[in-house]
Image (spheres, grey):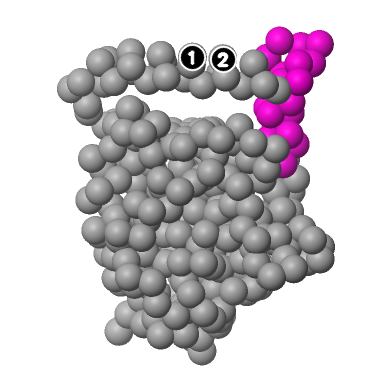
Amino acid sequence: MKQPISLVLSGGAARGIAHIGVIEELEKQGFEIKSIAGNSMGAFIGAMYAMDKLQEYKKWILTLDKVEVFKLIDFTFSSQGLIKGDRVFNKMKTFFPDKNIEDLKIPYVAVAADITNMKEVVLTKGSIYDAVRASVSIPTIFTPVNKGNAILVDGGVVNPIPINRVKRIEGDILTASYVNANIPYDKPEISNEDEERKNSVYKQKIKEFRKKLNDILPKTSKEHLNYFTLINKSTSLLTHHLSLMNIEKYKPDMLINISRHSGGTFDFFKAEELIETGRQAARKSIEQYNKTMIDNQKDILT
């Protein structure tokens, strides 16, 4: 009999691709995901799983190289965000027909933050596309979502790893996958024959992108700490500590930690590496969980 899991997926931009490897390893080792909750990229991967589209998305993401990633990014450099998001979100629509969250095969939750009314928004019904679009709206990166009198952004500013929002199932194992852990990164061995060619083109694109940023953003006294970098590093620090507080408060039965050094915001071209990283992290956590269960049973018997 499979062990039921209530699964929580953190945000983390491109690093969230590692959740795919986590899900695959959990299922491979006999766990059954009975409900899912996520924030930002975790909300997106959770939606893909809940709609039986995860493998289709994985197949596509594995074809992306660094140039293809930039083709999906429509820079706006507006006061509300650097990326409008139409290209990537239109591509997202091709993976699943929009449907109501309440019609999915398992309970699903996405979280967002309403910066107008200063509150967390827990999305458990209505359009799954709208829920994901709001949850992934990283401040300063993606433009926010206007909904009535609310302005919705990435839920990471209030609940980056929504352990307290996932629907619990009787006899479940509360499991959280956290892709922003401040731990060393043990890079898996992934071969790529034309990596050097891709790196050359990518570095040029990055150079052009940084030049645009330097042209429009206020400068600081330090060359490498511009306004954009300062805001994002501060936000990352805030969400990391909020995550640690949530993990300590709600104590998942199994915590799968993935290094925050495994990839950057736009490193979707590293999909194969990130998926394998998630798989290895899940395997390690499952082994530790099983060992703890055996030790606890021994203590009870003695």
At 53% from the left edge and 67% from the top edge, which residue is drawn?
A: 131
Relative vertical location of residue 254 with respect to residue 238 in this rendering, above or below:
below
Q: Secondary structure at mark 1?
A: helix
Residue 56 seen in the figure: yes
What is the C-alpha distance between the residues marked 1 and 2?
A: 6 Å
Q: Nearer the viewer, residue 78 or 152?
A: 78
The extreme bottom residue here reads: 170
On the image, the x and y values in percent for residue 139 come to 66, 45
On the image, the x and y values in percent for residue 50 come to 38, 72
Relative vertical location of residue 54 with respect to residue 144 in this rendering, above or below:
below
Identified by mark 2, the residue type is Lys
Identified by mark 1, the residue type is Lys
If the image is split into quadrants, where does the N terminus sit? bottom left
Q: Which numbered circle lies on residue 207?
A: 1
Which region shows up in magenta? Answer: 218-235
The crowd level at tag 1 (other Cα within 10 Å; few <14, some 14-19, many 20+) is few
Relative vertical location of residue 52 with respect to residue 91 in this rendering, above or below:
below
> Magenta segment: does it hold 59?
no
At 34% from the left edge and 46% from the top edge, which residue is drawn?
A: 275
Q: Which numbered circle lies on residue 263?
A: none
Disc 1 + disc 2, Cβ < 8 Å: yes
Which of the 4 image quadrants contains residue 76? Answer: top right
If the image is split into quadrants, where does the C terminus sit? bottom right
Which of the 4 image quadrants contains residue 116? Answer: bottom right
On the image, the x and y values in percent for residue 12 come to 54, 47
The crowd level at tag 2 (other Cα within 10 Å; few <14, some 14-19, many 20+) is few
Which of the 4 image quadrants contains residue 219? Answer: top right
The extreme left residue here reads: 193
> Magenta segment: does it hold 232?
yes
Query: Residue under circle 2?
Result: 211
At 39% from the left edge and 31% from the top edge, which residue is drawn?
A: 70
